[in-house]
Image (tube, rainbow, N blue to C red):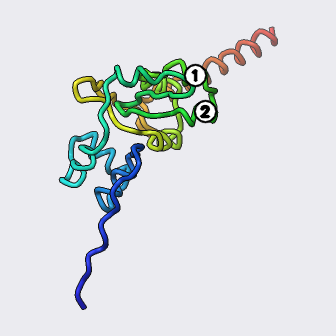
Amino acid sequence: PACTRPPAAPPLRSSRISSHQLATARGGARTAARWARARARGRFGPAMADAVADAKVYTYAEVAEHNTHEDCWMVIENKVMDITKFLDEHPGGDEVMMSVAGQDGTDEFEDVGHSSSARRQLDDFVIGEISAEEKRPEKVRKTAGGDDGGSAMSVIISLLIVALAIYFAVTLKSE
């Protein structure tokens, strides 16, 4: 029997393009996570390069025009996001989001320490990316298991302080 090629992925119809949509529509079996790693390393196959080229490119000036509750965009990790529909659903309230409306909110997003599911949810709001001339360098993010030992040291120091407090309390009480 002759092998048949599976049908090509349908063209993207929405102006809201998530990383996952780009990866699956243009890159076949590539997952969104593999796409993100490849993108971060600058390693794209021809199909992936076409998908990235199709993404809308914005400037910070364009993003700044979308800073109201009715039309709210922000930039996180050089991705432009339309978060208008998410404002009322955000667990921290819409005020937090509105404080960086029309701006780069990467630092604020990272400072809060969002969960991995919140990070995955970002892809649902991506509508494009910042122009190459205005992109900020991506920061290396600490991941679980990549701790430098600072938190373990603070636990040990805390336990030592508690042990010393108990020792002195018992010693002074017996005198």
Residue behind mark 2: 90
At x 39%, y 52%, the residue is: 13
Between 16 and 171, the residue placed more toward the observer is 16
List x then y, in percent, for residue 10. Answer: 35, 61
Position of the C terminus, as image quadrant, is: top right
Residue type highlighted by circle 1: Val
Q: Residue 171: x, y in percent?
A: 75, 13
User: Height in image: 43 above or below 152?
Assistant: below
The residue positioned 30% from the left and 73% from the top of the image is: 6
Q: Is residue 157 above or below residue 17?
A: above
User: What residue is at 41 percent from the left and 48 percent from the top?
Assistant: 14
Q: What is the count of numbered marks?
A: 2
Where is residue 74, by image quadrant? top left
Q: Locate residue 23, reporting x and y percent.
A: 33, 53
Query: Which residue is label 1 attached to?
Result: 96
The image shows residue 159 at horizontal and vertical percentages of: 62, 24
Q: Name the side, left or right, on which 27 lies relative to 160.
A: left
Q: For the residues labelled 1 and 2, say whether their Cβ atoms are less than 8 Å apart.
A: yes
The kind of residue tagged 2 is His
| Residue at image point 50% right, 27% down | 72
Q: Earlier in the sequence, mark 1 or mark 2?
A: 2
105 w.r.t. 80: above or below: above
Q: Residues within 10 Å of mark 2 (few under 14, many from 20)?
A: few
For residue 66, the mark is none
- Label 2 secondary element: loop
